[in-house]
Image (cartoon, grey):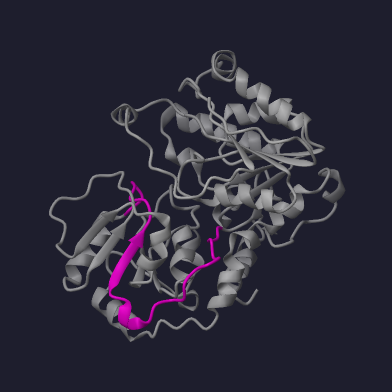
Amino acid sequence: MNSRAPIGAQGSGLIYFSSVPFDSYAQRPHFMASAFADHGFDKVMWIDPYPTRLPTFADFSRLGTRPPAPSHANDSRILVLRPSALPIEPLPMAGLINRIVAWRPVLVQVIEFARGTEHCVLAIGRPSKLAEWALTHVPHQRSFADILDNFPAFYRGISRCAMRIRMRAICRKVTDVYCSSSQLALELSPIRRDAVVVLNGYRTDNLPLPSPSGKRKYIGYVGTIGEWFDWPLVRSLAAALPDVPIRLIGPEFVARPADLPANIECLGERPQDEIAALVGEFAVGLIPFRINDLTAGVDPIKFYEYRCMGVPVWSTRFGEMRTRTAADGVHHIAHDSIWQHLWDAANRSDHGFPGLAEFRANVSWSKRFEPILARARMASAERDAAQPFVHGGFPVTRDSHSTQTSHLTRQHNGRE
């Protein structure tokens, strides 16, 4: 277990059980931790995730590999803990065993951190036994779960069952639940009808202006190429448009298909400070995700990344992308799409985006996190239990899903 220099104790504090390591490329958890530090929380403790499933053969093949260098500046206001753990979490007594053999130093630091604050908030980005223990044993005034994915869908067998049980248990215990998509909130509505949708966003400060049409020549993709990436769809697109360069940017965690068309260019992972310029060369931004349990609850950040640079989007109908239309700059694609027709239409576009400044303001991370920060400052759940909370977010229930989808569409069009 490693940590950065400790921070003096006073005022309000956040203990954040992150879903991603601190030393990974900047994602929603990084921007959330910084937002709390920017808005009145004197202390922020970030706890890296540890293995919450049984190991697989692929895990052993990655032993000895170095994680990529972080693509964001270290924030001295954030204390980072990196707990170790035996990879036994789904098994009975796993929490007790890890508390004895691995977590004692972490437990001491977490409790001392909480006791050194007047107002402590526990935030859980990925369900785990350590986070569940903290909800019971660490003194705090507020707690929330920020559900970013259908976590059980990433696991198999006993690991999947254990994660499903743990996620529901944590969502019942916390004072507030936030979900990054309407589908995730809908799935949790039987146990948390007050779950609030807080969509993803993008780092919009210091973005360059969109490139003129003459500089846009690629159909491009930015992001991880994992098991959710629809390689057959991309191959069919490339084969149908052999003279159009297709540029894929990001780490690859699944094997490339054999005999890729020559117009597909794989650049691999690139530094974050280069991405805006690369996206600026896209005539179309591609989101070719498979439609399955993994993607049903996803609000892809790359949608905001593309649109913030004035790039139209071709996306499959998954997750939050199902609700977006041509008014949002989105055209839906499938294996039977008429690619030449879509490409001709994209070339006729002038890539104008009259509402760009408003769109960037509305999807900035600081704007997105306003409802979470407002709720986190409250002293207790009892004060607001009598009335719904709708400041910047909105609760979702089975009865309100169609209304909420309409709200999403208006919001994405910049009319809210």
Q: Quadrant of residue 241?
A: bottom left
Magenta span dominant secondary structure: loop
Give the magenta part as a residue range. 200-229
Queried whether the magenta region covers residue 204, the answer comes back as: yes
Residue 290 quadrant: bottom left
Residue 98 drawn above or below residue 161? above
Q: Picture coordinates of residue 150 (x, y %)?
A: 50, 45
How far across and down, in percent of the image, does residue 156 sit? 41, 33
Q: How many numbered marks does the figure carry?
A: 0
The residue lying toward the viewer, choosing from 153 and 239, is: 239
**Residue at point 63% right, 64% down?**
404
Magenta residue check for 182: no
Residue at 73% of width from left, 46% of height from top?
41
Q: Is residue 57 left or right of residue 243?
A: right
Q: Looking at the image, which residue is at 54% across and 45% down? A: 74
**Front residue of 22 and 7:** 7
Residue 415 seen anywhere in this rendered image of the structure? yes
Residue 412 visible within the image:
no
Q: Position of residue 106 (x, y in %)?
A: 61, 24
The residue sitting at 38% across, 42% down in the picture is: 68
